[in-house]
Amino acid sequence: GAGVSQSPSNKVTEKGKDVELRCDPISGHTALYWYRQRLGQGLEFLIYFQGNSAPDKSGLPSDRFSAERTGESVSTLTIQRTQQEDSAVYLCASSLNRNRGEQYFGPGTRLTVT
Amino acid sequence: QQQVKQSPQSLIVQKGGISIINCAYENTAFDYFPWYQQFPGKGPALLIAIRPDVSEKKEGRFTISFNKSAKQFSLHIMDSQPGDSATYFCAARKAGTALIFGKGTTLSVSS
């Protein structure tokens, strides 16, 4: 079946602009995660959705970052007033549910803030 | 506080050799320990995972060794091949939470 998809694959934006990144999880997966990967670094957790429960936002680095998910489908990560330090690959992953450890990642969105 | 420490940062292995990557964790509540493989420009792909009730898991050329008392786990790649050249990440989580990743190991297998 189809894996996790993300769009756009690349995004170049000017400092101060807002950006929206989209994630389509695997059908039937109720848990969805966003991570950030800076160049040459590991993955940093940003936010986690599980069904209709309140999301775990503990990883969001500032109030410029927010995310939404409608039910168990698409999620959008929004970064307002982008800064150069926001340049990174933003990865989305989904899993069957919060108790299943296996997370499946999309290809990521490479964000460059100029 | 880095909850998952991974070493080495980079590794060069001859074709046919054994690649070994190590991780150490601090939180005894962690109950799931996966390894991910990432090629340039791609998202991480789940390679193999283990839970703390077993000490070893093998899938093909890949083996996880788990030492609960030492809070350490490692990935062994037997008969390493040039196609194994990638970045490897260990991770850990406690039930119902997101994964916490190590900083990654870049493996180069020379032919």
Image: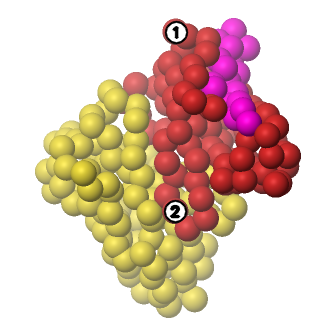
Chain colours: A yellow, B red
Tell me the CA gap for discs 2 and 1.
32 Å
Tell me the crowding category of disc 2: few under 14, some 14 to 19, or many 20 or more residues within 10 angstroms, Cα based.
Answer: some
Tag 1 residue: B53
Seen in the image, is B107 located left or right of residue A76? right
Percent of width and height locating residue A108: 45, 65
Seen in the image, is B85 located left or right of residue A50? right
Percent of width and height locating residue A38: 62, 64
- Residue B7 visible to the viewer: no
Say above or below: A61 vs B78.
Answer: below
- Residue A13 visible to the viewer: yes
Tag 2 residue: B42
Seen in the image, is A28 located left or right of residue A96? left
Tell me the SS state at disc 1. loop
At label 1, which amino acid type do we have?
Asp
Q: Identify which residue, A113 or B103, lies in the foreground.
A: B103
For the stretch drawn in magenta, the main secondary structure is: strand
Q: Quadrant of the C terminus of chain A?
A: bottom right
At label 2, which amino acid type do we have?
Lys
Q: Which residues are magenta?
A: B63-79
